[in-house]
Image (cartoon, helix red, strand yellow):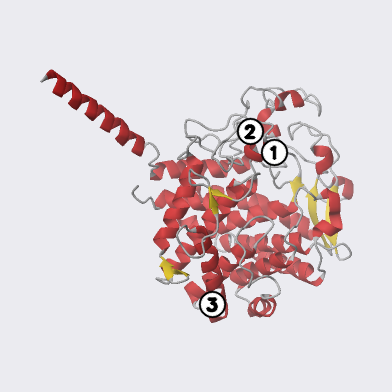
Amino acid sequence: MASAMFSLVVQIVFFTIWFLSLLCYGFTSHDYSDALEKSIIFFEGQRSGKLPPNQGLTWRGDSGLSDGSGYHVDLVGGYYDAGDNVKFGLPMAFTTTMLAWSVIEFGSSMGSQIDNAKDAVRWGTDYLLKAATATPGTLYVQVGDPNNDHKCWERPEDMDTQRNVYKVTTQNPGSDVAAETAAALAAASIIFKESDPSYSDKLLKTAMKVFDFADKYRGSYSDSLNSAVCPFYCSYSGYQDELLWGASWIYRASQNSLYLTYIQSNGRTMGSEDDDYSFSWDDKRAGTKVLLSHEFLTKNTQEFQVYKGHSDNYICSLVPGTSNFQDQYTPGGLLYKASASNLQYVTTTTFLLLAYANYLSANRGVATCGTSTIAPEKLIAQAKKQVDYILGDNPEKMSYMVGFGEKYPQHVHHRGSSVPSIHQHPDRISCNDGFQYLYSSSPNPNVLVGAIVGGPDNKDNFADDRNNYQQSEPTTYINAPFVGALAFFSKNVSPN
């Protein structure tokens, strides 16, 4: 009898442990809301310029207050792209576009975070407006020499590397960065249309001017600026994809038929018929197709029906079991595209899955994959797997968002986070003296709340090592699309 009772107790204990393990990563609406708040706070850690009184990450201080002054222009503000102190225009503009798209699609699910999300967008657009309007026939696209900046390990408040300014002009064009800037300004104009109509109008009018500049004076900024942007943010995909992307955003913001005609006339030569399978700061083709499918699926704009088919091809490539499936996943279920900063592709892909699911649902549609179809619910489930993996439901049991969950990266490749705060250590820490903190085995003294790092390798392994920038460096363009995804799941949690 005692033996049977003991066996029953053992079974109950085993079942309880097993059941609790299943619940361990059953993220709740509160969890996603918490992650959403933190994903937006991260952008405060990337701010350049004079910080506002309501700055949340208080270990940061003012920086880059003279940016542009040597060139007689005001280029104060904007975002540092990642763990260094350079303001790169192409990824900053893409970050701003994706933050704005997150608000456009999922702002209604952001609750109390909507104003913070819009503030994050505005911090980007305020800077981009300066860069676009300071000098006629010119777009300022970068502050800081990356080659010199990367020779130092110093917090932005102390940086004394030369703050070179780089620009594209009619003689040295940059259609890629200019058209992405136009996209960012146009997308942002949508979210401020009701709350600040004069600002919205300024954004849209500037977007149109910058786009005209990009289209009229064609060329890649990589060719014009060479080692200042390469290999850091070379425009490997060229500039055609950005021109179509920029025109698409201006059309969505303005509904001006001139841009509809432009898209119809130039779409084929600008990659509309290319079935491309990644979406990033460099390659906009997949994103453009999903964006334009919105006009067909929600407004029945027949001119864009072709983009529904191409969006289906892209979406089907992500879903195992379909005839179009061709992506790679890790054993733990993470989409895997690249060895360096892989999570940037995961967050952009996740965003497109959810946005497309929204568009299909509005039309009671499905994605067609050869002879089979995929309902929006399956796209949402696919996206949720990626979101949950990032937040900790993975073989490492590691949250790849700093400050979220019980276990997250402690040795983030980020100058400001790894060097003692200027408030704790007011004395200047020089270029070379900072390297002791890069090589230190101690956790970062300043928690870069909400930062999503590059992520694990193709076997789900992650090295929490500050020197391993491929895995441990956060970027603004990893976080930006994830803001939208987290907003969605904060209000749409399906049962596990």
Badge 1 or badge 2: first in the primary sequence: 1
User: Could you tell me which residue is drawn at 71 percent across and 28 percent down?
Assistant: 438
Along the viewing direction, whichever of 117 and 171 lies nearer the viewer: 171
Q: Which of pointers 2 and 3 lies earlier in the amino acid sequence?
A: 3
Task: Locate residue 190: give its quadrant.
Answer: bottom right
Residue 408, compared with residue 99, is above or below; it is above
Upstream in the sequence, badge 3 or badge 1? 1
Residue 141 position, x and y percent, is 78, 54
Q: CA distance from mark 3 to mark 1?
A: 41 Å
Disc 3 on helix, strand or loop? helix
**Observer-nearest of 165 and 227:** 227
Q: CA distance from mark 2 to mark 3?
A: 44 Å
Number of numbered callouts drawn:
3
Q: Is residue 78 above or below residue 210?
A: above
Above or below for 389 versus 325: above
Residue on which disc 3 sits = 305
The image shows residue 356 at horizontal and vertical percentages of 49, 64
Residues at marks 1 and 2, CA–CA distance in whole angstroms: 8 Å
Amino acid on which the number 2 mark rests in the picture: Val
- 207 vs 195, left or right, is right
Which is more foreground, mark 3 or mark 1? 3
Give coordinates of residue 373: x percent, y percent: 42, 68
Where is mark 1, residue-wise?
83
Residue ranking furthest to the left: 1
Assess disc 3: are there few (<14), some (14-19) or many (≥20) residues with their C-alpha within 10 Å of its C-alpha: some
Q: Are marks 1 and 2 in contact (CB under 8 Å)?
A: yes
The quadrant the N terminus occupies is: top left
Query: Any mark on residue 412, and which?
Result: 2
